[in-house]
Amino acid sequence: MTAMTTASTTAPRTLFDKVWDAHVVQPLPDGWDLLHIDRHLLHDLSGTAGLRELAERGLPVRNPELAFATPDHAVSSAPGRTGQSFAGGVHLYQGLKLLTRGAGIRLFDLGQPGQGIVHVMGPELGIVQPGMTLICGDSHTCTNGALGAIAFGVGSSEVTHALASQTLVLRRPRTLRVHFDGLPGAGVGAKDLALAMIARLGASAGTGFAVEYAGEAVRAMEIEQRMTLCNLSIELGARIGMVAPDAKTEAYLRGRDFAPPEDRFAEATAYWRALPSDPGAVYAREARIDASAVAPTLTWGTSPEHAIAIDARIPDPADAADASQRQAWQGALDYMGLAAGAPLQGQRVDRVFIGSCTNSRLSDLREAATLLRGRRVASHVRAWVVPGSENVKRAAEREGLDRLFREAGFEWREPGCSMCVAANGEQAAPGERVVSTSNRNFVGRQGPGARTHLASPASAVAAALAGAIADPRSL
Amino acid sequence: MQPFTLLRGAAAPLAIDNVDTDVIVRIERLTSLARGALGPWAFEALRFRADGSEDPDFVLNQPRWREAPILVAGRNFGCGSSREGAVWALLARGIRCVIAESFGDIFHANCFQNGVLPIRLAPPELARAHAACTAEGPWQVDLRTQRIALPDGTALPFEVDPLRREALLEGLDDIGRTLKLRGAVDAWQARDRAARPWAWPAAAAPQS
């Protein structure tokens, strides 16, 4: 009854508004808020930089118990790696260890359960929960919004600010709700839906917005698929992507290391269940995507918005909407070594990468391994699997997935960001064509001159087996 | 942080949409170089050809714009990665102001933490700015009056958030000001510990 009374006396609010409102420590002039940050993930690149900056200013970490650190960016993924394997990252790795120890921050070190890509670690350990605010010096922090949190990436100055004060000075973004109506067909997953959305709405459609994903297809997704969807929010331009918590969220979190303990779980779920948007809550913008009409989708160019259905032809700059788009398309074709009007299918592939905070979780590896069963990677393709975390790696090995990958001709590697961001020297050679389950096909992202096609794990497997871009529905 | 009041100099046209922070600076430069050393590596994917030589067609390689402190860009400049090194690389090259139709949200916030002024202009005004890049004579970007003076004397007014403007004019970042609100954070946390006890993990055990 209390909840109903509250609902009838206040304006209907969105999920985003409820979480934001609950974290305003103090409103500041001109529409700014001092916002409390409940969780802070630190990695070897921006985490080390933020901790160093804090030390240089002579400031302590205000709430070390709310920060969680792991090395992921500048560490090797080679089998048997140590923190010394990638020489260029040793100072960052050692810095993270030393500074977190000094500050009393939990660190999940190489080879230990918990280590992994920050955004795989956060949900996996139950660090992020519905209704929380979470930041990390990494733009794909939006991944964590799949659990119903406001989670977003920041630069290293804001990392330092949050370490010092456990707050950030922020202006409330506007809200955008994207509905995915209907259910996707066979061979079409969250990655395809996200790429199709970005192609439709554009890579800057979400700038200035917090996105909430809704609709039948999103409700039907498991939590790990929702993470894939939320992960790509930043490629739509949005710092924040969220999915309302539901029974799947509760089941996912129950029993995880840092999730509410059993004797407090009912109390926590009661709070979580009040978070979804009220009926009639108003979003600044709404968009609809027919999930049932989405085909396996890959990128052809150098922006995530350069995405097309697997059976489509590569666009012709002559058909661009304006001069700016025409120039961008032509530049992308030149960089990617592709001809306008050519089919995407059949483009010869040199490398396949299954990994990254987008698609490196156990469900991704299961899907990929299942499709591989009994088949071989094309002889000219170098194919890698980089599990998202030590826990994912161990769970996959218990199921024998590593064996399926190895037998098919994949390299089975150690957890980290690896070729997604190539901060550890793991990159493709100039001109090499890579089908990658990661999130960015920017010029030079996977190495100078490397040609990246973003794809789902299923499409990555199809490409690895065919030695060329291929339709996963044919497997 | 260096204050920003009045900036005078050339404006380089970079009329490309969706210039991402990977293109502004490669991540491997950030693992190996100090902030101040990033200047030569700004836009390396665009500045250099495959053989390592400078691409003379790229705007920042052309003599008149080599030292330009102003960049006139397109839509969604600085999208992608949160790396603050993108702003450091621009700064180390001497770029203190970027004018664009829109910016990646994280890059936009990072600019203000480093004394770089990002200015949003609507497409018609941005088109005028692009046209003025090739005119003779310096530009002036005045944050005090919120006006861009083009070489021909035309003024383009711009909006900037009052809080951000003040911080740039004074050369202040947020941390000092926020730490003065410590009492409010203490009070919020005390209330939250009571309301959401499950959301507060115990302190980490000391590491051996």
Image (cartoon, helix red, strand yellow):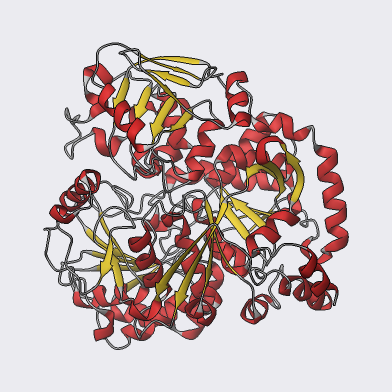
- Looking at the image, is B154 positioned above or below residue B49? above
Q: Which residue is drawn at 17% across and 27% down?
A: B56
Identify the image quadrant of the C terminus of chain A: bottom left
Q: Which residue lies furthest to the bottom in this view?
A: A374
Q: Position of residue B76 (x, y in %)?
A: 39, 44
Quadrant of residue B134 within the rendered picture: top left
Q: Front-most of A244 and A128?
A: A244
Q: Which residue is drawn at 29% across and 35% down?
A: B44
Q: Where is residue A182 in the image (x, y as percent from the top left)?
A: 43, 82
Q: Front-most of A371 and A269?
A: A269
- Looking at the image, is B132 positioned above or below residue A441? above
Q: Front-most of B93 and A80?
A: B93
Q: Residue at x 32, y 68 (%)?
A: A455
- Looking at the image, is B72 positioned above or below residue A135? above
Q: Is residue A273 left or right of residue A151?
A: right
Q: Can residue A217 be seen in this view?
A: yes
Quadrant of residue A98 within the rendered picture: top right
Quadrant of residue B163 within the rendered picture: top right
Q: Is residue B38 left or right of residue A122?
A: left
Q: Front-most of A392 and B162?
A: B162
Q: Where is residue B202 in the image (x, y as percent from the top left)?
A: 81, 60
Q: Position of residue A409 (x, y in %)?
A: 28, 76
Identify the image quadrant of the N terminus of chain A: bottom right
